[in-house]
Amino acid sequence: MSIDSTNSPEMPCPVFKSGSARLFLDGKWCDSDLGHTLGVINPATETIITRMAYGGRPETVRALEAAQKAMKSWSKTTVMERSNLLRKTAEILRQRALEIATTLTLEQGKPLAESRGEVLQSADTLDWFAEEGKRAYGRVIPSWLSDKRHITLRHPVGVVAAISPWNFPLSLQIRKLAPALAAGCTVISKPASQTPLCLVQFYECLEEAGLPNGVANLVAGPASEVAAEFLSNPICRKISFTGSTAVGKELMRGASDQIKRLSLELGGHAPFIIGPDADPEMAAQIAVTGKFRNNGQVCIAPSRFYVSKDLRKRFTEAAIEATRSLKVGAGLEPGVQIGPMFEASGLRHAQDLVDEAKSRGARVLVGGRRDVRFDRGLFFEPAVVDDLAPNCRILTEEPFAPILPILEYSQIDEVIEQANNTPYGLAAYAFTNDLSTAWKLAEGLESGIIGINDPVPTSPQCPFGGMKESGLGRELGQEGLEAYYETKYVSFRIRGS
Ligand code: NAP
């Protein structure tokens, strides 16, 4: 971290109830043992917003021990008690939505309206699991023998480590924490080092709602230390991770020693297929909105735009026009649709992808370079590119950047094959009103999430997750609760029937 100036005077500074941004261990706000802090940077100004307490292994051990102790009583609470805590937290989160959304925009960069959407969706997720937790039924299984009876019971998996990334720092943590608490597990939240602040404010909501000591704990610190403790300490029974495929693979290897339970939400490279019958102008509008949300730094962002050959010209013209009209700026400014990139390495990566595509013959139709209208901040002009070489990096590596690459196809079978030709399998999108084409795509695409005429398929009650190297397991929906239970089978031998 080379930047050391403080937040510029015109930017608001988040306020924390315990006076500063700190860890939350066993029901108490704490500094790190060694007094270490990390400056959290506003990507719109490249200055430090505030400093966050930054712990390591000892604080992680304390959090795990507190969670283990709390597990004894929390796992025995009734589903109604757990539901009430989640509901109350959702209520407080909604009351503080604007304040927490502002913090999220300051540390992550996305426009305020998107941050507000993330906060409100997080509250909906808490409410969904507050209800779904009440429906964690077991089964009665018909016996083959007259003197036996069989049932299954749900058993909370144990102490859970929840590791989340920077692109949706609030909602991706709450997708783990809410079902884990609903199932009777206790939790240690590990945010991305650069976006802990909105989670500190979320933990204040949990505390105000009556969270018992040790049931949820917040540890910020270097992943190399915190995750190493999660992996080696037998108190931690499950790791739920959202982040890159590379780290997901590392965790999978590390978790094998103790057969720790794992949920993995990893990278993606979503195809967006515009069917031959689609309205190309409307599809372009949706494509631009979907692609540039949070600057393309979204795991389910559409990343390859396959347009039916006859529609290519109209789609491309409309996409260029819609991209040109986007308002770029600091996320707190009214009307801004595209904030800064999250970090300098992401901005360089976006530039590298454009340059590599160009060097192999691609045309950059709009944008594609650092936005020189801003003298500070990590602003990049959203880009539309076409005429891409088949294996250029933007078509094979997860881009995580505001670049919309256009490709054309002639046959649906051919485009399904191209769309599936990647190790990823998180999301896919298709635009068509032809029922047969829609079914063919839904059945043929190898993705865990498929939006047919729906560019925003995420919803608290529906399963979210990837196939192939995009992950393991599902979050949200019934499956998202299931992930925090073990199934216990109990067989009874009874007398005399
Ligand atoms: P990342 O580098 O994998 O980091 C994600 C989280 O893991 C952060 O909290 C990070 O902590 C921590 N971490 C880093 N190295 C670790 C290690 N060796 N062991 C354990 N934890 C470690 O990913 P990112 O760059 O922040 O996020 C972008 C990636 O997340 C993209 O690939 C994106 O597709 C994926 N993602 C997936 C979903 C989904 O639902 N499938 C949703 C959003 C994002 P530090 O910050 O302290 O390093």
Image: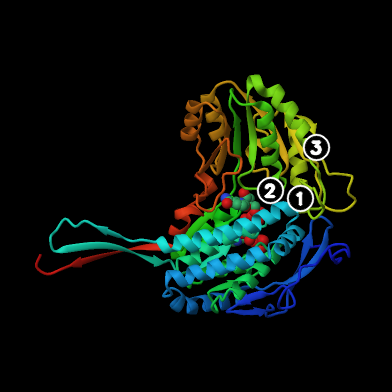
The answer to whether the beta carbon of the residue marked 2 is less than 8 Å from any atom of ligand 1 is yes
The one of 211 and 223 positioned closer to us in this rendering: 211
| Label 2: element kind | loop
Q: Is residue 219 left or right of residue 142?
A: right
Tell me the amino acid under the disc marked 3.
Answer: Ser
Q: State left or right for residue 14 relative to residue 299.
A: right
Graded by Cα atoms within 10 Å as few (under 14), some (14 to 19) or many (20 or more), the crowding at tag 3 reads: few
Label 1 belongs to which residue? 341
Q: Earlier in the sequence, mark 1 or mark 3?
A: 3
Which scheme is used to colour this image of the protein?
rainbow
Do callouts 1 and 3 mark residues in contact (Cβ within 8 Å)?
Answer: no
Quote the CA–CA distance across marks 1 and 3: 18 Å
Residue drawn where x is 20% and y is 63% of the image: 149
- Residue at 49 percent of width and 52 percent of height: 474
Q: Earlier in the sequence, mark 2 or mark 3?
A: 2
Can you give x and y, in whole percent of width and height, for residue 61 in the image? 56, 76
Query: What crowding class fits label 1: few (fewer than 14 Cα within 10 Å), some (14-19), or many (20 or more)?
Result: many
Q: Mark 1 falls on what kind of element?
A: loop
**Rendered location of residue 230, percent (x, y):** 54, 68
Q: Quadrant of the N terminus?
A: bottom right
The image shows residue 309, relative to residue 106, as above or below, that is: above
Gap in angstroms between the C-alphas marked 1 and 2: 8 Å
Looking at the picture, which amino acid does disc 2 mark?
Answer: Gln
Q: Amino acid at mark 1?
A: Met
Residue linked to disc 3: 325
| Percent coordinates x, y for residue 14 in the rendering | 76, 68
Which is more toward the observer, 92 or 238? 92
Q: Which residue is mark 2?
A: 297
Which badge, 1 or 2, comes first in the chain's sequence? 2
Quadrant hosting residue 112: bottom right
Label 3 within 8 A of ligand 1 by Cβ: no
